[in-house]
Amino acid sequence: MKTNIERLMNGLIKENPTFVLMLGMCPTLAVTSSAINGLGMGLSTTVVLVFSNLLISAFRKVIPNGVRMPAFIVIVASLVTMVQFIMNAYTPSLSDSLGVYIPLIVVNCIILGRAESYASKNPVVPSIFDGIGMGLGFTVGLTSIGLLREILGAGQVFGMQVLPLADKANGVAGFTPITIFVMAPGAFLVLACLVAVMNIVRAKMDAKGKPLAEPSGCLSGDCAHCGQSAMCTGRSAEAAAEAVTAKAEKAKAEESAGKTE
Amino acid sequence: MKELLLIAVGSAIVNNVVLSQFLGICPFLGVSKKTETAAGMGGAVVFVITISSFVTAVIYKYVLANEFLRSKGIDLTYLQTIVFILVIAALVQFVEMFLKKNMPPLYESLGVYLPLITTNCAVLGVALTNVTKEYNILESVVNGFATATGFLIAIVIMAGLREKIEYNDIPKPFQGTAIVLVTACLMSIAFMGFSGMI
């Protein structure tokens, strides 16, 4: 039981996927234009994560190591398809506004990341709790970013008008929505501020001697800790890119050397 | 012809895949430090997305949404997500092997980026968009190529900007990823200017 609670808190706070690990940034940017979208995306990801952790953990001794990635992907893709149809049937408006991002849960790095780094090595029950913790952590992250963007961009909370809007024609003073925050650029801006705030928090915690977990997603350019690294040979994007540039530069240098001769 | 042009301009510029649809953020942030490597990554993405949108469109039309099976009451379209992700993963591996063996010069320039693209959400995103928008095979290929070109444009511009940002005096908390995201925000605002085009 102790490990289960530890797993739950680990996902919610210590290794929060949105704020601390900075994982799954594509959905974080795309669906947080309102709190309800963030909540819907977070919860559907949680459902997929819990069941994929359960199944992968249950089958961990059966799946051969060489084909584990394709096997994980089939499991996750089946679960995502199920979630997609359930949402289509019961929450059609949410399903419409999330659109293509629901099937794209398949390539969310949190899910394959947890499968690879936790569920495939641990028993079923802790894996389920790990999924719940990570999923809820992601939900909290998405919902709070969504809330912030919705308040600034429309003066609403979960679709309810909380800040009375200004009406210039009738001379009513009030809140003028900063529409850019619910549009595409606002997503980048809010995330940029979030990263900056986390940099400050990180520096403070380091000074206190209680360092936070390092960000381990695409955002930090760190492929080594990504769950999908097994699929893409595990080389970090940057290292691979640098190898190419170094080669090109070498070729260029050789060419110019040849010319001077 | 006019429809194809509209699809191409719409996907490449107006609804830019990175800046307004938020697909492929990882390589956009990870591999945009130098213009040359960004162009290499962009080229590899164009290559893979064009091929994969052709293959997935063919598979969707002739296997999943097969007329004959449909007339028998079997509808396999619900398998699209599972089939597409597996096809894309296999395809990227296959393209890598094929290039290595038959076109070494192309492999030299694109090869290292190919494995990074397998789980790029833009590839799956394009395949699924083609289905939702009910594009035929030609339209799917054009849409795939245009979307990937949009990615190439965005990542090359971003790399060019980042090379300049290197020399700027940036507040400490914003150093690194944060300032890159602010740059992306400004680029996104600039690309919003195209939204009246179509």
Image: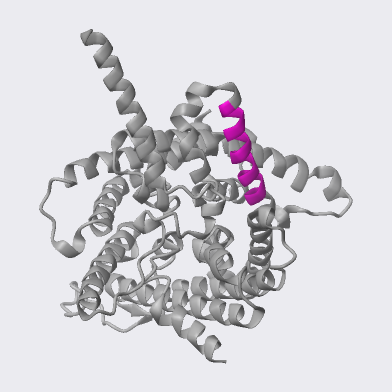
Q: Is residue B76 magenta?
A: no
Q: Is residue A1 left or right of residue B66?
A: left
- Residue at left offset 62%, top offset 68%: A120
Q: Choose between A239 and B125: the one closer to the eye.
A: A239
Q: Quadrant of residue B154?
A: top left
Residue lying at 45% horizontally and 85% vertically, measured from the top left? A9
- Where does the magenta region start and end? B84-100
Q: Nearer the viewer, residue A48 or A53?
A: A53
Q: Decide whether the magenta segment is chiefly helix, strand or loop.
A: helix
Residue at the limit of the structure toward the right, as seen here: B72
Number of marks drawn:
0
Where is residue A102? Give x, y as percent. 56, 63
Residue A170 rendering spot, x and y as whole percentages: 19, 77
Q: Is residue A253 above or below residue B164?
A: above
Q: Position of residue B75 (x, y in %)?
A: 79, 54
Is residue A239 visible from the viewing direction of this image? yes
Give the residue at x 41% y 52%: B26
Quadrant containing the C terminus of chain A in the rendered view? top left
Query: In this rendering, is residue A32 above or below A244?
Result: below
- Outermost residue on the top side: it is A261
Residue B146 horizontal/vertical position (percent): 47, 36
Horizontal relation, residue B161 to residue A32: left or right: left
- Residue A179 seen in the figure: no
Q: Is residue B89 magenta?
A: yes
Q: Quadrant of residue B151?
A: top left
